[in-house]
Image (cartoon, helix red, strand yellow):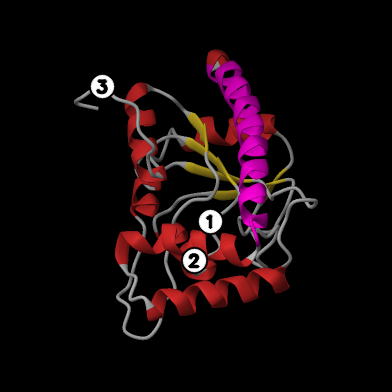
Amino acid sequence: MLKKKTAALTVSGTLKIAAKAGIRVFATGGIGGVHHCANDKPLDVSSDLLELSRNQVVVVCAGAKNILNLGATLEVLESLAVPVFGFQTDEFPAFFVRFSGYKIPCIQNVKELAAIAVEHWKYSNSAILLCLPVESGFAISPEVWSNALNHAINKSVEDKIVGQASTPYLLRAVAEFTQGATVVANEKLLLANATLAAQVAIELIEKQGQA
C-alpha cells in the first residue's frame, strides 16, 4: 500500500483493504482456516478467520481449503460469529471437493443474501461467507482427495514444514499427486465465484439504495 504497487494478498489482507475502500463483495477460491495438527506441529490458525469477524464484506468462496481441518474451521467461525451460508446447497463445500459433510444454512438466490447482509450489518461488523461448490465436472472425488491429502501431509511432516509455508507446500503437493487436476478445479471455481460475487454486488447496491 505504501509503495502503491499491486500484489497477491491473502483473504485477510484483501478483506482489510476491501473494507477500507468501501468494497462490500469480493470473490476468492477458498478461505484459510485451522490446519491439521500432525505429530509435534504447532496449532496453525489462519488470520483469515479473525479478519472475517471484523470487516463488513461478503466473501464468495468454495468453502475453506480442504487441506485444512474443516470441522475445526467452522467451529472457529461460529465462535467469531461469522455467518456461513451455502449458495443453493445446505452443505459446506470443501474447495476442490464439492461437499464436506458439514451442514450450513442454504441461500437460494442473491436477493435473499443481499437482504440478509443489509440487516446483519446493522448489528455486526463481521463478514458474511457465501459458499459455492465447484462444478461437478471439475471436482475432485473424495477418495482421490483423501489419498492426495494424506500424501501431502506426510510429505510436509517429513520435510518439517510449519507455519506460513504450510498452505503453499500442501497445495503444490496435492497438485502433483492429482497430476494438475486440482489446478484446473481451482481455475474453474474462481471463475464461478467471481460470477456469483458480481451478481451479489449488483443486488446489494440495489438493496442499499432502497434502504
Quadrant in the picture for the N terminus? top left
Q: Nearer the viewer, residue 133 or 89?
A: 133
Label 1 environment density (alpha carbons within 10 Å; few <14, some 14–19, many ≥20): many
- What is the chief secondary structure element of the magenta stretch? helix
Q: Is residue 90 left or right of residue 163?
A: right
Q: Which mark is residue 64?
A: 1
Specify which label sits upstream in the sequence, 3 or 2.
3
Q: CA distance from mark 2 to mark 1?
A: 7 Å
Q: CA distance from mark 3 to mark 2?
A: 33 Å
Specify which label sits upstream in the sequence, 3 or 1.
3
Q: Does the stretch in magenta take in 92? A: no
Amino acid marked by disc 2? Leu
Residue lying at 50% horizontally and 59% vertically, measured from the top left: 172
Q: Which residue is mark 2?
A: 68
Q: Could one spot residue 33 in this view of the protein?
A: no
Tell me which segment is drawn in magenta: 179-208
Q: Which mark is residue 4?
A: 3
Eye-nearest disc, 3 or 1? 3
Residue lying at 33% horizontally and 76% vertically, measured from the top left: 160
Q: Is residue 199 left or right of residue 11?
A: right
Q: Position of residue 169 (x, y in %)?
A: 43, 62
In the current view of this chain or complex, which residue is farthest to the top?
209
